[in-house]
Structure formats: C-alpha cells, structure tokens
Image: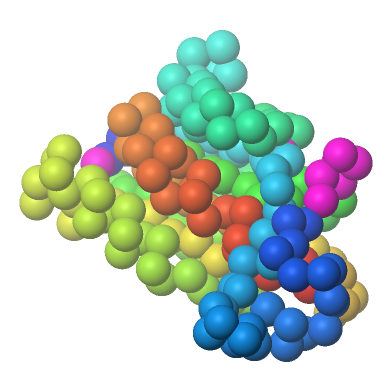
Amino acid sequence: MSDEADGNDGRREGRADGGDDDHHAGHEHGEAGTHDHHHHDLSHLSMAVVTVSSTREETEDAAGDAIEAELRAADNEVATRVVVPDDFAAVQEAVREAVADESVDAVVTTGGTGVTPDDVTVEAVEALFEKRLPGFGELFRDFSREEVGTRVVGTRATAGIVARDPDTPDAGGVPVFSLPGSENAARLGTRDVIVPEAPHLAGLARR
C-alpha cells in the first residue's frame, strides 16, 4: 500500500420541521422562503473504520487512530475498527460486513487509494457503489493541494453509497468514504469533509 497525499440506540434524526417523514418535506420552501434540506440529518453517527494495509497492525495504525480521534472529537462513535490486507476480496468483505451492521451509519477506509499495483481499495469499493459521490474526492484533493501540491494527482480518494442489503431495496444505504493511508491525509479528510457531511449523507441514504 502506498501512503499518498462505528447502534441506532441513542441516535436520532435531527429535524428542523415538525418531524414530517414525507419524501418532499425537506425540499419545500417555507413561508419565509427558507429551504430545509437537512431535516433528515443524523445528530451523531456510529462509524466503522477499515484500514487497508498488508504491513500494519492495529497497534501501529496512525491513520486509523487519526480518523477515530477526529470522529470522536465531533461526538461520533466508532462501532468497529479493523485492519485488512491490500487485497480486493478482503477489502470488499470488510466493507460489506460493516455496511450490513445495522449499528453502523457510515464507513471510512484508509489506504490503498494510490497507483501502485497493490492499491486496490478504490476498485474494491467502487464495485459496491450504487451511487457515487464524486464531490468527495474532488473536495479532498482541493484541500490536500495546499499540503502536497501537484502530488495530489496521485490520490484516488473516492466515496459512494453502498446498499445495506442488496436483496432488499427498502433497506437503504450507507455512505462509504475511502481516504489515503497517510496520517495527515486521513486526518484532513475526516475532519474537513467527512465530519461535516456524513450526518447529512447518512440520513439521506437510509431513507
């Protein structure tokens, strides 16, 4: 892997309206012309963190530690955390297992987003996406440019929605975010993009 530049209990959907679950409720303009696009947002999240590396153990997983620290600092929980090798099937299995866990609202992976032959995370997770979120990678690379300059072209950070249960369309989906394996990149992506946006995306994906 190249290091290029976690129950629903206790969680609620934050609503600015009266709790109307109608599909269009969050897309109507009120009398004052306001547009409530966030009434499906979750107040805090339970996350899964998957580190992709054939050389690291969980006890020396600086990127995973950074992700967990940023998530907890924002009052989120880390329900599960695992380290898997740089292997297509292993990455998919870990992501599928996390997404199938009803206690998990979103998944963050770190590692395997570069261009070396063993960087397979992007291929593994994108094969599971029902919907892609191209803005995540674009925004992450924009933020990373200040730190790594033009080397940002070497990162393929990606995100999308994975079905909770592919055989049950009404089961909803789970956002999966894939970040590079460096500690700085993992911290930046989690703090500046995932923490602000995951509650909104997770709330919409589960509808």
18 sits left or right of 63 in the view? right
Residue most extreme to the front: 32
Nearer-the-camera pick, 76 or 161:
76
- Position of residue 62 measured from the top left corner of the image (x, y, whole percent): 44, 20
- Position of residue 77 measured from the top left corner of the image (x, y, whole percent): 70, 32
Residue 186 is covered by the magenta coloring: no
159 sits left or right of 11 in the view? left
* Above or below 26: residue 184: above
**Quadrant housing residue 16:** bottom right
Nearer-the-camera pick, 106 or 11:
11
What quarter of the picture does the C terminus occupy? bottom right
What quarter of the picture does the N terminus occupy? top left
Count of number-bearing discs: 0
Say which residue appears at 74% left-offset and 82% top-offset: 25
Say which residue appears at 31% left-offset and 64% top-offset: 138
52 sits left or right of 147 in the view? right
- Over which residues does the magenta segment extend? 5-12
Say which residue appears at 78% left-offset and 57% top-offset: 13
- Position of residue 178 measured from the top left corner of the image (x, y, whole percent): 48, 51
Q: How is the image coloured?
A: rainbow
Say which residue appears at 32% left-offset and 49% top-offset: 114
Q: Is residue 111 visible in this depiction of the protein?
A: no
* Above or below 132: residue 200: above
* Above or below 30: residue 194: above
